[in-house]
Amino acid sequence: MANLKELRIKIGGIRAIRKVTAAMKLVAGVKLRKAEQRALASKPYANELKKILATIKRENLAKSYELFDGRESVKNETLIAFASDKGFCGNFNYLLSKKLKEIVAERRALGIKVEILCVGNKLYQLLRHSLSENESAELVTEFYKGEIFSNAKLLAERVASEFREGKSDKISLVRTRYHSAMRMAVEEESLIPLKREENNDVTETIFEPSADEVLENLLPYNLGIQIYQAALESMASEQSSRMRSMDNATRNADEMLGDLTIRYNRMRQYGITQELTEVVAGADAIAND
Amino acid sequence: MKVKIFRAEEVVYEGEAAKVTVPAQNGEMTILPHHISIVTNLQRGRLIVHKENGEKFQTEIGGGVCSFSDDCLSVLVE
């Protein structure tokens, strides 16, 4: 059985850990709210972009219709996957990598060569050993630092040019969708071919300089905002996951502290009782002499 | 006519205007109310909203797209 001093040290250690986890929970809460607000603030822009995209009809286009229809045979696909740079967020990264591995296995069966762009260091580390030579993973570094929208746009321009050059025939996102603090799901979403609503509006619209050029100009913004929103949702999910796991950790620490304190008190009392018995026994022995 | 100017992170301007001058890809362009529906690319330059009371709202943009339809102009800028 551990002695009193050892127990005291242990209790001190757990108390310190509890302080850290409680603080991390609060910080995650603040960051979660920030990510939610930013996601909300980007909604009007995204909606407007969708509306403009809907005015461009298939028949307006002379050459860029591949962006709407996709390519007939898909040989190469780029997946952009969002996870976190930091740990301590429960099974958030694990769930994403699990889904991603399923997707990769599915593509492998179809004979599609996959390139994965990992946003988030943790995901990259979970993933890189499980790929065959037909698949490659690349870490997108420092995505969450600085201006996230401009990082998203850079990434968008990169994948758009890969599509144009024919290095990739399909671009998809794999990310965690944030429904609420309790409900999150990893989902796959197509970037190119573009998702868009058909517009049955018959009013003539002029495109300056041409519908193709407008679409080409719009493309980085459109992909950029989708990547941006995916990143924000992923951030919100990460923070929410972290909040939950830190809450659990704090609660576990409380439980352990309770147990240990009882044990400590009991042991201390046992020591005192024993000492008293010894003193009394000693006194008796002297009196009897 | 109604004018809305959006940046990815925020709504920059929302309100009524008498006319709007935008730096279109083929040169500066002024849009008046009841213009025909148009979607045009924007380049780097200055965007000016002329309000009905004569005041102006100006902002520098790094490019973008603007769309006019149903007497409503929406501008997505960088």
Image (cartoon, coloured by chain):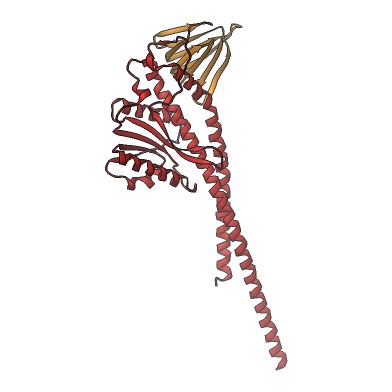
Chain colours: A red, B orange
Q: Residue at x 48, y 19 (%)?
A: A51
Q: Does residue A165 sit above or below A184 in this rendering?
A: above
- Closer to the camera in the image, A79 or A61: A61
Q: Position of residue A96 (x, y in %)?
A: 43, 43
Residue A60, position as x, y percentages in the image: 38, 14
Screen quadrant of the N terminus of chain A:
bottom right
Instruction: Return the residue nearer the eye: A36 or A63.
Output: A63
Residue A175 drawn at (x, y percent): 44, 37
Q: Is residue A81 rendered to the left or right of residue A252?
A: left
Location of residue A70 in the rendering, given as x and y in whole percent from the top left corner: 35, 26
Compared to A279, does B4 lie above or below?
Answer: above
Instruction: Find residue A204 and report its image quarter.
Output: top left
Left/right of residue A25 with respect to residue A79 in the rendered view: right
Q: Quadrant of the C terminus of chain A?
A: bottom right
As drawn, which residue projects farthest toward the bottom? A289
Residue A25 vertical position relative to residue A266 in the rendered view, above or below: above
Furthest toward the right, the residue is A287
Choose top left, top right, bottom left or bottom right for residue A104: top left
Q: Is residue A114 visible?
A: yes
Residue name at image x 58 percent, y 62 percent? A11
